[in-house]
Image (cartoon, helix red, strand yellow):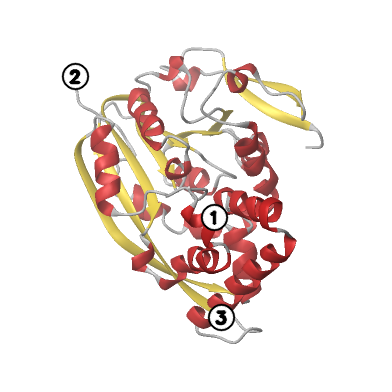
Amino acid sequence: MGRAFVLLAAVTSPRNMSGLTWHRCGLDAKWRPSFLRRRRRISYLEMSQWDDIAKDYEVRVEPVTSSFVKDMLEPLERITDQGRAARLLDVGCGTGGATLLASEMGFSVTATDVSPPMVNRLQERSDDGVECAVFDGQCLPEEWTSTFDYAMSSFSVIFFRDPLQGVKEMKRVLVPSGKVVISAWGDRSDSPAFRIIPDAMKEVAPELVSGGVKKEVISTAPELENLLEEAGFDSVCVKGPISRTLEIPTAEEYYNQFALQSPPTLSMISWMRENMGPDTVDKFREKVISLAVERGGQQLDGPIEIVSPAYVAYGTKPSN
């Protein structure tokens, strides 16, 4: 890809997805497309953080998140009453693990993410059956209103600066009676593994946690239910917790995978480095590795097992 990003933009009405034409434009890495410059809800810092982890995200994070996709999509009909493939929008698609699985399952998929490198990687991996676009999920194109049968968010909208706005946008682009499906990591109480990073942060930098730098992420069934209902969805239901046991080669890899691939955690690490010094960052890393060994049930130089719970929420857009 080099210093050129791929931007894919719809130039015909998305109401007829089969007739979409998509244009590619080479974008200099220092240039931000106008639709991102005018989005006040996302900062360049947040966007660049996702850009920075794109290279490793596919290898370290995607296998974990993608393991829940079939649980999300199995209840959904692939073929509509009109006999065509159901149109599905993947919001916050990342490098495309969920997108590609949805396409394999028979959905007609359009995928979008705010990170150009993420979308570029998906474009490289996908065939002509998947449409890709760089957009902020909190402000999707007006032309997409009432277009999709389903809107999916695989562990993405929960990390938005304004999750409610993201879910409202998903509702707007759905056809009447269209369905939304969102996955979210389970509450820390569901798995000791999910408490490793916050517990390490609390011990090493308690002032950071108490000072409000940390952003709480939606992670319980009631929170998900409330989020969808507040966005205006009917027939809201939540499945879970659904658990996967992940084997991670070493405790150090746990740190690399779960701390260094998470923009919210990277923000906290950056804050520690700037305000408390690099020694504090080193102590945080050592504490995370120590807790991973303890809670993963293995020695420092061996694999650890982490139980990862998640919830899946569904809602239906009102028919009128």
* Label 2 crowd bin: few (<14), some (14–19), many (20+), radius 10 Å: few
- Which quadrant of the structure image shows residue 116? top right
What distance separates the C-alpha of mark 3 from that of mark 2?
Answer: 53 Å
Q: Are the residues flagged by discs 1 and 2 in contact, CB closer than 8 Å?
A: no
Secondary structure under the numbered disc 1 in the rendered image: helix
Front one among 1 and 263? 263
Q: Secondary structure at mark 2?
A: loop
Residue 106 appearing in the image: no
Give the side of residue 207 with respect to residue 79, left or right.
right
Residue occupying the point 60% across, 45% down = 95
Q: Tell me which amino acid carries mark 3.
A: Val
Dividing the picture into quadrants, the one containing residue 173 is top left
The residue depicted at 34 percent of the width and 20 percent of the height is 146
Q: Quadrant of the N terminus?
A: top right
Residue pointed to by mark 2: 320
Look at the picture and state if 73 lies above or below 14.
below
- Amino acid at the residue labelled 1: Leu
* Residue that protrudes farthest toward the top in the picture: 12
Q: Which residue is identified by label 1? A: 208
Which is in the foreground here, disc 3 or disc 1?
A: 1
**Which mark is in front, 1 or 2?**
1
Against 84, residue 70 (above or below) is below
Describe the element under mark 3 as helix, strand or loop: helix
Quadrant into which the C terminus falls: top left
Question: Of tags 3 and 2, which is closer to the observer?
Answer: 3
Q: How far from the left and from the top, in percent, is residue 73?
A: 35, 47
| Vertical comparison of 192 with 168: above or below | below
The residue shown at (59%, 48%) is 263
Q: In the rendering, at what x and y percent does residue 129 appear? A: 53, 34
Q: Residues within 10 Å of mark 1 (few under 14, many from 20)?
A: some
State the residue position of label 3.
293
Q: Which residue occupies 49% across, 47% down? A: 98
